Amino acid sequence: MTLNTSFERHSLPLEYPFTIARGTRTKTDVITVQIEDDTGTVGIGGAGPSAHYGETAATVEAVLPDLLKVVEDVGDPHQLARIERRLRETVERNPAARTAVSIALHDLVTKRLELPLYRYWGLDPTESLETSYTIGLDDPDTMAEKTETALDRGYSTLKLKLGTDRDIEIVETIRSVAPDVDLFVDANEAWTPREAVSRIERLADFELAFVEQPVPADDPGGLKFVADRSPMPIAADESCITVADIPQIADRCDIANIKLMKCGGLREAKRMIHAARAHGLEVMLGCMTESNASIAAACQLTPLLDYADLDGSLLLADDPYAGVPMPDGVIDLETVDRAGTGAVADR
C-alpha cells in the first residue's frame, strides 16, 4: 500500500486572551497532518504543542518529515503498534508531533473500516461526558463576565485558572454569579505546598470538585504534602506526562490528568487510563488550545473517563475543522454519523 503524507501549519486566534499562572496568549499555532491511502481516503490528525513541554510549532514541523517517513516506509496504517514503536525510536521527545501522526493514523484506519473510532475501541457512546469550559486568569470582574457568557452558552461545568494573590476573591466572585455550576480550579504549579494547603482550606467553602496541580511538578514531595492535608481531591497535570508517571503520582493525588499532547499518542493515552485505574485513581482527559483535528480524537476516549476537560477548540475564535458536537458542553458521540475521529474540514 502506498501512503502519501503532508502537514500544514495554522495560526488560530483565541476568542479571548488566555492567561494562566505562566503567561498570556492571544493565539495558538497548531499543525495538521494528513495521511492518504491509495484509495483516496485521508486521515486527519493535529498537534497542539506546548512550550512548557519543550515543543513549538517550529519543532513539530522540524521532526514531522522524519516521523511521516516512518509511516510511508511501513506502508500499512493498520500496523499501529509497529508504527508507534518506530515513531518513538525516531523521535524520543516531541510528543505533540507524534500525537498528530497517531491521530491521523487512527482516523485513516477507522475510515477504512467504516467505523467511528469509539466503536473500533468497543466503547459505549452513551457513556460520554460533559466537558468543562475554562475561564482564564483575569481580574475578578472580567472573569465573572466571561463566566456569565459561558453560562449563557449552556456550559455547566467550569474550570477556573488561579495562581495570583486574589485567588480567594476570584472564586468567591465566580460563585456569586454561578452558584450551581460544577466548578474546579487549576493553579498550574503556582503555589508552594504550605500556601496550597492554606488556600485549599479556604476554597473548600465554595464546594469545588477538585484542585488541579497546586504545586510545581518538580516537587513530588510537595504534591504529597498537599494531597495528604487537602479536604478536596487533588488532580495531577504537569506531574503526569506518560504512563511511567502513573505509579509515581498514585499516592500523591486522586485524579490523573492525561493529555494527548503530553503523552505522545492515542495508544499511550489508553495505557495511561488503564494504569491510572489499576492504581485507584480517577481519570480526566485534558487538552491544550487545539483545533478539532486533535480534540475530536480525544473526545472518542470520553466513555473511559471520570472527567473531560476538552474545551481546546471551544476557546478558539475560528477553527478550520469541525469535530464531535458539544451542545451545551456535552460531548455527543452518539450523533457522530461518520467514520474516524469525527474531524472534518470546516471550509
Image (spheres, rainbow, N blue to C red):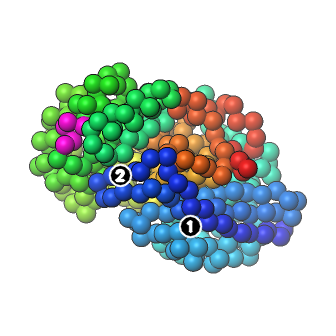
Label 1's element? helix
Q: Residue 92's spot in the image, x, y percent?
A: 50, 74
Q: Tell which circle, 2 or 1, labels the residue nearer the N-terminal end.
A: 2
Q: Residue at x 24, y 49 (%)?
A: 163
Towards the viewer: 270 or 143: 143
Residue topped by disc 1? 97
Q: Residue 64's spot in the image, x, y percent?
A: 61, 73
Towards the viewer: 7 or 246: 7
Question: Which portion, as a residue range, is magenta?
Answer: 166-170
Image side of residue 118 versus residue 41, left or right = left
Kindly report the distance in space between the C-alpha atoms of the residues bearing marks 2 and 1.
24 Å
Q: Image height check: is 312 above or below 85? A: above
- Secondary structure predominantly adopted by residues drawn in magenta: helix
Image side of residue 157 versus residue 94, left or right = left
Q: Is residue 205 magenta?
A: no
Residue topped by disc 2? 19
Q: Residue at x 70, y 36 (%)?
A: 336
Tell me which amino acid carries mark 1: Ala
Tell me which amino acid carries mark 2: Thr
Image side of residue 109 versus residue 253, left or right = right
Towards the viewer: 282 or 330: 330
Q: Is residue 333 visible?
A: yes
Q: Is residue 167 magenta?
A: yes
On the image, which quarter does residue 11 sit in? Answer: bottom right
Q: Residue 301's spot in the image, x, y percent?
A: 56, 43
